[in-house]
């Protein structure tokens, strides 16, 4: 019976026999552990693994690629124009090397001797000249300017290029977005009217990776108004006079813009007489002179008076004086009249209308009628006048 070894297939090596051309390896020479696996990018090397040898060539994030003496690729440098051709502009770098910039990157005319900013690119042309880009340098400088404006709060000037959904595009050397909500504090601002005009804006958001820039006109206006308001609050004092424009009207009074700060004329300070309606005294857009009543710097509030610009009519009335007056209201117990001389209002009681009893006030006078009255009493604190018609000619 043949051995198992003799019957083994020809293409299978016999166990425990070395390959024909390979020397046998002694068991004691085999290492106890397998060699460590090759490190994978992004994973830490096993403990005790030798560090890889440092790279000897190529750029790293800490050391930008350089080509040519002293010039890093991507660095913006000043170059001098040597010659201008149809498709290219020859320039000379500060180190004396020759360079070339595509003619299409120049927006306007360029002449030999002009000094321009350009960025060194990582290639040379077939004539071994350094290739530079004015457009790329301009874009990088624009990003630096916008980022600096965001950090410092410096306003930038740009042109409103076009109106788009939700806002407008502002050309800052880069594309900036002006949302409709950031155009103005005034409701209903006409964004279309700004297209083609230069505007000053504040940069409020910058994302270079997404090439996103958001700007605001409203925030700049608010900042300037706060600065003006601060200065105006320092200058205003109770009793001083100021001129402003009525910007809004409400039930409680009128708001006046004093040129940086806003103050309120309470309805009680609009007129010395009876107030029928605020609109009968002032309208939005009116230029008015007012007297400052009080200034609260901490709350940024200014109290104003329109009636204080004129003398108090009740101070000019004397007891016993006979005045011409106009009937303004007729009530059951008498009539209210306004003195024609100064506008003070008073009441003629029904008992002082006529010597003949039994007549209702509306049977004796009508609104708008002019009558003569005599001043009987003055209550300046309560601002009231007691008047008489029947005592004008005969006093009791």
Image: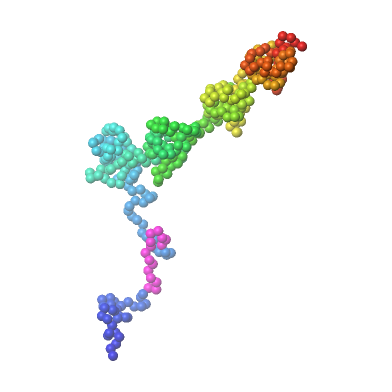
Task: Determine the residue positioned at 53% across, 22% down.
Answer: 287
Residue 266: % across, % down: 61, 27
From what the image shows, is residue 92 above or below residue 239?
A: below
Asked if residue 346 shows in the view, the reply is no
Left or right: where 192 falls relative to 79: right
Task: Determine the residue positioned at 41% across, 60% down.
Answer: 43
From what the image shows, is residue 83 above or below residue 127?
A: above
Residue 179: % across, % down: 44, 38
Please tell me whether residue 112 belongs to the stretch shown in magenta: no
Q: Quadrant of residue 309?
A: top right
Residue 270: % across, % down: 61, 23
Asked if residue 62 shows in the view, the reply is yes
The magenta stretch spans which residues?
Answer: 31-45
Quarter of the figure that contains the C terminus: top right
Q: Quadrant of residue 254?
A: top right
Q: Indicate how the structure is coloured in the image.
A: rainbow
Left or right: where 324 falls relative to 96: right
Is 234 in front, or is 313?
313
Left or right: where 260 falls relative to 2: right
Q: Quadrant of residue 384?
A: top right
Task: Determine the residue positioned at 36% across, 57% down.
Answer: 54
Residue 46: % across, % down: 42, 64
Task: Determine the residue positioned at 27% across, 43% down.
Answer: 130
Please tell me whether residue 39 belongs to the stretch shown in magenta: yes
Is 95 in front, or is 138?
138
Prevalent SS, magenta region = loop
């Amino acid at each position: 019976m043949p051995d198992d070894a003799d019957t083994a297939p020809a293409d299978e090596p016999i166990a425990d026999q070395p390959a024909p051309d390979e020397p046998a390896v002694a068991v004691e020479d085999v290492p106890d552990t397998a060699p460590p696996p090759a490190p994978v990018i992004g994973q830490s090397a096993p403990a005790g693994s030798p560090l890889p040898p440092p790279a000897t060539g190529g750029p790293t994030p800490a050391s930008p690629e350089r080509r040519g003496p002293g010039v890093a690729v991507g660095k913006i440098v000043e170059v001098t124009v040597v010659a201008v051709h149809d498709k290219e502009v020859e320039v000379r770098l500060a180190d004396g090397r020759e360079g070339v910039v595509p003619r299409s990157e120049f927006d306007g005319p360029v002449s030999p001797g002009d000094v321009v900013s350009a960025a060194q690119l990582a290639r040379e042309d077939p004539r071994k000249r350094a290739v530079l880009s004015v457009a790329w340098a301009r874009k990088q400088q624009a990003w630096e300017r916008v980022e600096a404006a965001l950090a410092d709060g410096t306003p930038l000037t740009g042109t409103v290029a076009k109106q788009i959904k939700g806002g407008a595009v502002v050309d800052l050397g880069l594309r900036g977005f002006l949302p409709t909500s950031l155009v103005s504090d005034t409701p209903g601002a006409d964004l279309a009217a700004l297209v083609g005009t230069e505007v000053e804006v504040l940069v409020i958001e910058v994302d270079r990776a997404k090439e996103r820039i958001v700007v605001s006109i409203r925030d700049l206006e608010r900042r300037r108004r706060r600065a003006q308001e601060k200065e105006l609050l320092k200058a205003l004092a109770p009793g001083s006079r100021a001129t402003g424009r009525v910007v809004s009207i409400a039930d409680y009074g009128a708001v006046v813009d004093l040129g940086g700060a806003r103050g309120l004329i309470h309805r009680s300070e609009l007129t010395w007489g009876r107030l029928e309606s605020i609109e009968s005294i002032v309208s939005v857009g009116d230029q008015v002179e007012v007297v400052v009543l009080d200034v609260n710097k901490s709350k940024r509030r200014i109290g104003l008076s329109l009636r204080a610009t004129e003398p108090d009519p009740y101070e000019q009335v004397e007891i016993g004086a006979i005045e011409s007056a106009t009937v303004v209201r007729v009530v059951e117990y008498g009539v209210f009249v306004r003195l024609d001389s100064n506008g003070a209002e008073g009441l003629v009681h029904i008992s002082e209308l006529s010597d003949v009893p039994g007549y209702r006030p509306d049977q004796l006078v009508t609104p708008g009628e002019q009558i003569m009255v005599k001043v009987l009493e003055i209550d300046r604190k309560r601002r009231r006048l007691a008047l008489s018609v029947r005592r004008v000619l005969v006093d009791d």
